Amino acid sequence: MKRKFIVVLSIILVSGISCASFNDAYLENINDVVLMEFSDRSLYRGQVEECLIGFDVESCMHGKGIYAFKAGSKYVGEFYNNKPSGKGFFKHVDGQSYQGDFHDGMIEGYGVMIYPNGLSYVGSYQKNKREGFGIMTFNDAGMYQQNSRYEGSWKNDRANGTGFFSYVDGQTYTGNFVNGIMTGQGIMTYPDGRRYEGGFLNNQRNGYGVMIYQDGAKYQEGSRYEGEWLNDMRHGKGEMIYLNDGRRLRGLFKENAFVGS
């Protein structure tokens, strides 16, 4: 039978099926396996069942099966009425893969996505997008250090809501994200012991915040600044309290420097 494949594998380039089962061994001990060839030269091998497409009764992919695209991508898993539904494993020709839940031809539920550049995501999906709670591990050594990690809320495929980000060097951020960017209220801890709690905008300290110094270098441990920030610098009204001699600089700051009361 030749008929155009109608499965909605609109996966973003891209469980009960392991990567080791990504071949015909998945169909072992299944007796009612058939082979179907489609007009685009893709192939399906697996279970079928009659279903209604438009006004025609057709043999549809239904049950367990393997669908191989002409270009080399492949889906191994469960089908329902001609669409991936249930547990499955999809591997794109570029190496990106997804293992987990499908519904009505789309990634839906819980799964693991591995990207060609080494990034990995483990968590919830809705309609092919990361949605709900999930963990992203960065391995590209690009914008983020290799093995940096985000865990928290996702919406519309990006980090949105409350989350936790940890860098390999020990720096951490706990707080709000908007479209993958630290924006809103949060807490940043630094490898040298400093701790900032307050406002963020575009991944920088902005708005009102409190920085406690613990590095014992420029400021004695326990010294603190409370006040306004702009683009990661003390800027605006604030007060700097030095622990060693009790000095208090209260007034206006500009680009980290005290300019007067």
Image (cartoon, rainbow, N blue to C red):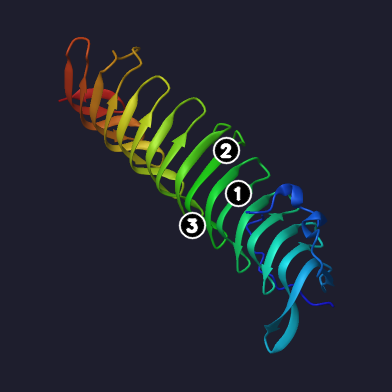
Q: Which is more toward the observer, 253 or 106?
A: 106
Q: Position of residue 204 (x, y in %)?
A: 38, 36
Which residue is label 3 attached to? 156
Amino acid tagged 2: Phe
Q: How many numbered marks appear? A: 3
Q: Quadrant of residue 57?
A: bottom right
Q: Position of residue 136 (x, y in %)?
A: 54, 43
Q: Is residue 95 visible?
A: no
Pick whichever of labels 1 and 2 is earlier in the sequence.
1
Which residue is drawn at the image coordinates 36% and 16% (left, top)? 215
Which of discs 1 and 2 lies nearer the camera? The answer is 1
Q: Which is more toward the observer, 251 or 180?
A: 180
Amino acid tagged 1: Val
Q: Position of residue 116 (x, y in %)?
A: 68, 44
Check whether the beta carbons of the residues at disc 2 and disc 3 lie within 8 A of each other: no
Check whether the beta carbons of the residues at disc 3 and disc 1 lie within 8 A of each other: no
Q: Which is more toward the observer, 23 or 178?
A: 23
SS label for mark 3: loop
Residue count near mark 3 (Cα–Cα under 10 Å), binned few <14, some 14–19, many ≥20: some
41 lies left or right of 61: right
28 lies left or right of 188: right
Q: Which mark is residue 138?
A: 2
Which residue is drawn at the image coordinates 62% and 36% (left, top)? 140
